Image: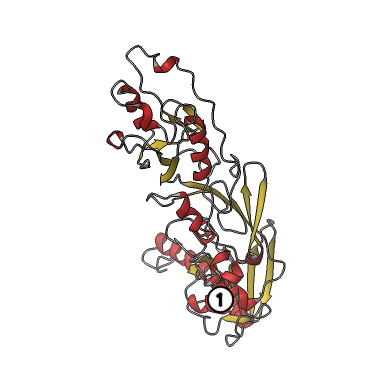
Amino acid sequence: MIRRTPRSIAGIVLSSLVGTTQPLSVLAQSSPLTAPSSNSVPFEQRVPLPEAPPPSNVRPGTILGDAYTLGAGDIVRAEIFDIAPELALEPRYTILLDGTLNLPWVGSVPVQGLTLTQAAAVISAKYGRFVRNPLVTISLLAPRPLKVGVIGEVNRPGSYILSVISNEVSQASLNQRTSSEGGNQWPRVTQAIQSAGGVTQIANIREVRIRRLQTDREEIVAIDLWRFLREGDLSQDILLRDGDTIIIPKADKLDAGEATQVAASNFSPETISVSIVGEVTAPGSLKLKPNTTLNQAIMAAGGFRVGRASKKGVDLIRLNPDGTITRKKYSIDLDQNLNEGRNPALYNNDIIVVNRTFIASANDFLINAIGAPLTIFGGISGFRNLIFPNGNNGNNGN
């Protein structure tokens, strides 16, 4: 019985160098070959064995379930069995930009888009020309960073690079991964949304779509992040793959309670920027938590100026996603809870204008009306004092 000993593919090259002293039978799993004589034909001139096809249940380019697929930048370990153990090495191979591995004897092998199992089958078929029934294993040493797109109702839509694990992973462990495992290893949908600044307050998180490019087609994966929030269903926060695009649609109608819960989640932005001007104690720009209400923003600005602020004359100015501007007047009742009609939730870049009461406006008008002549009169008096410093106004005392 032959004992199967793993060694690296690179070790095959060393085997060929000692072919005159080491029997070639160690290269075979069955039907050992005759050891070469001193006058044997050089290896380069030998006729290779017919190339063995991949196993019938593995088709290159097919994506099996949620298995990891290889791409440019991945670093893998390649091992072949039934080679002399003293020649075993532990090489690292990096998948090149064209999606190929450059291996001893067989040269360039395309592995782009293949799982580890599929890549091993393709490489095994290549080495089948030189070794009978070779058994090849491929493990992932360092995955490439994932490039994903996030579009729709997020604050900073665009393309993002997400880091992944760096410890060695076999195909078996990849196949055993579930959506509730390895949260700190593989990027998930919510991590990509966080990178994009979080969802907007009009995002429909119930109908998030993942556009995933397969080898021969495009796949759309539907997820419901509301179930993730309400029920803790981690299967909705799926693991991402390189090239995924996350699409977050706009909600047709927002529920106040749902909006509050979404705003408290980790895939919402930490703060929103709101400006408040007019009759409040501390006007200016405020950094507030998402889903902060109009009443809360006024209180954050120090509250109304007593005797001057009109509680029935507060304007909310909003820049809409389509570029239009809306202005709506609210009558403030500080006892109101979140309410779209009386105490709405604020959006990023909202502007609050707290107007004056009628009495305050009239008083300001009178002060300005009287103050202007007094200012003019004071200016004339000052000018006369410059001309007549003794205060005699030009009289000589006659």
Place of residue 261 in the rendered image (x, y in percent of width and height, measured from the top left):
56, 75
In the displayed structure, 45 sits above or below 105; it is above
Residue toward you, 79 or 280: 79
Viewport quadrant of the N terminus: top left
Residue toward you, 289 or 243: 243
Image label count: 1
Horizontal side, residue 139 vs residue 280: left or right: left
Say whether residue 373 is visible.
no
Colour setup of the view: secondary structure
Horizontal side, residue 274 vs residue 143: left or right: right
Q: Tell me which residue sits at (40%, 13%) in the image.
A: 41
Place of residue 47 in the rendered image (x, y in percent of width and height, measured from the top left):
49, 18
* Label 1 residue SS: helix
Which residue carries the number 1 mark? 367
Horizontal side, residue 246 vs residue 71: left or right: right
Place of residue 124 in the rendered image (x, y in percent of width and height, measured from the top left):
49, 35
Say whether residue 315 is visible.
yes
- How crowded pointer 1 is (Cα within 10 Å; few <14, some 14-19, many 20+) is rated as few
Q: Quadrant of residue 292?
A: bottom right
Residue lying furthest bottom in this view?
Answer: 335
